[in-house]
């Protein structure tokens, strides 16, 4: 039986909201954006006119009182995500939040508590999980064709000029939650975690090298996984030659992904170890041509909602990624290794990603 189109609304109409609207326009047979919310009337009108969105509201509260919705897209700055997610969940409306889903582990646990008391679900936009290349890699791992994962590299080497931080919520611990570890590299190492599974320990450094921020602009980490894999992760906004690069070395092959903000099948490469040349054929056979991106994740979300299942990426998945971020900061600022599960509610890094202990913490957040 065909399902009625899902009714969705976009909260916040800044830059990333246009990516949501564009992707939703490719899925118009499955869902409709029936409303949008923004505190700026002019920006809201311009956005709704561009994307033919019929209903316009100045607050989430007003929206939830007026519309029957299946899903809200949180496209607001990170500091708003927790409160908006909880408000929607209390109205039994499913939530899809842009990254980062919250500012702290404490916030993530509040969202999970609200989700547990709701009939609705919470999910995070981590669109790199949904291209056919990533799914092909997980398939071959599941069949043991690639052998045991041994080492991995996860680099987010991006560049942002000083002017990028002119928006008052950028580069501030209190409203953005962190620098490239929190807001930029998160997509790449979320994909890394989705491939390799649970991490177990991290040793890290973080620095503020050049940019006019109160957060770091560079971090580097060595991460151990429960399956024995050891990975390095670099997150940087200081690289004029930009790239996003992941490499997985298995006992039977190396698998690489290089792109910038999204990948296609051509962004992936498999190099077999001697004696395992047949893996090249198996790899190519598993590619379906689906690129990473919001459209791919949105389609998976609507598949889940149609079957009344939790949409990907779940709050549990998101917390695993957020806990790694917290551990990177904790390790960097305490100069000690941090184990998964170590950041409990009594840790200063549970309620603040910087733990109020960044080396430059004496600089006021007044950018």
Image (tube, helix red, strand yellow):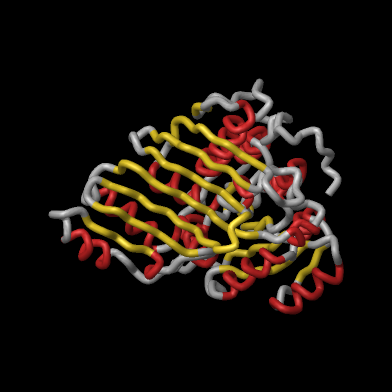
- The percent position of residue 114, horizontal first and vertical second, equals 65, 38
Query: In the image, 293: left or right of 48?
Result: left
164 vs 325: above or below: below
- Locate residue 201, reporting x and y percent: 47, 30
Judge whether 64 appears above or below 104 on screen: below
Residue depicted at x 71% and y 29%: 357
Q: Which of 81 and 31 is in front in this view?
A: 81
Quarter-of-image position of residue 148: top left
Return the residue nearer the eye: 247 or 101.
247
Quick check: can you spot residue 312?
no
Q: Is residue 292 left or right of residue 114?
A: left
Residue in view at x 65 percent, y 29 percent: 350
Query: Which residue is nearer to you in this view: 130 or 357?
Result: 357
Q: How many labels does the image show?
A: 0
Q: Residue at x 67, y 69 (%)?
A: 18
Q: Residue at x 64, y 41 (%)?
A: 207
Residue extending farthest top = 346
In this rendering, position of residue 153 left or right of residue 25 = left
In the displayed structure, would residue 186 be above or below residue 268? above
Residue 301, horizontal then vertical, whole percent: 51, 58
50 relative to 301, above or below: below
Question: Which image quadrant is residue 214 in?
Answer: top right
> Is residue 211 among what the camera can see?
yes
Dividing the picture into quarters, in which one does residue 246 lie?
bottom left
């Amino acid at each position: 039986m065909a399902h009625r189109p899902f009714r969705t609304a976009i909260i916040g109409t800044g830059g990333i909201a246009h990516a949501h609207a564009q992707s939703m326009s490719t899925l118009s047979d499955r869902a409709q954006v029936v409303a949008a919310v923004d505190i700026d009337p002019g920006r809201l009108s311009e956005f709704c006119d561009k994307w033919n969105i019929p209903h316009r509201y100045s607050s989430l509260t007003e929206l939830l009182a007026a519309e029957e919705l299946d899903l809200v897209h949180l496209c607001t700055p990170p500091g708003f995500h927790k409160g908006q997610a909880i408000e929607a969940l209390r109205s039994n409306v499913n939530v899809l939040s842009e990254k980062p889903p919250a500012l702290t582990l404490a916030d993530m646990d509040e969202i999970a508590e609200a989700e547990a008391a709701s009939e609705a679900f919470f999910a995070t936009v981590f669109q790199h999980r949904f291209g056919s290349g990533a799914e092909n890699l997980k398939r071959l791992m599941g069949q043991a064709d690639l052998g045991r994962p041994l080492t991995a590299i996860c680099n987010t080497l991006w560049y942002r000029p000083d002017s990028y931080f002119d928006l008052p919520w950028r580069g501030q611990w209190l409203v953005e939650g962190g620098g490239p570890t929190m807001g930029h590299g998160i997509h790449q190492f979320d994909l890394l975690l989705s491939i390799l599974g649970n991490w177990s320990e991290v040793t890290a450094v973080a620095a503020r090298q050049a940019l006019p921020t109160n957060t770091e602009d560079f971090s580097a980490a060595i991460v151990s996984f429960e399956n024995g894999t050891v990975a390095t992760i670099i997150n940087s906004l200081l690289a004029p030659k930009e790239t996003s690069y992941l490499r997985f070395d298995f006992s039977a092959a190396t698998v690489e992904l290089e792109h910038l903000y999204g990948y296609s099948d051509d962004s992936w490469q498999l190099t077999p170890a001697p004696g395992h040349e047949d893996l090249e054929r198996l790899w190519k056979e598993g590619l379906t041509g689906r690129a990473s991106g919001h459209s791919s994740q949105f389609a998976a979300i609507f598949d889940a909602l149609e079957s009344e299942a939790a949409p990907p990426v779940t709050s549990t998945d998101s917390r695993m990624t957020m806990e790694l971020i917290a551990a990177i900061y904790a390790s960097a600022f305490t100069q000690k290794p941090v184990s998964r599960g170590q950041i409990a509610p009594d840790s200063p890094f549970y309620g603040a990603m910087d733990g109020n202990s960044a080396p430059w913490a004496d600089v006021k957040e007044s950018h």
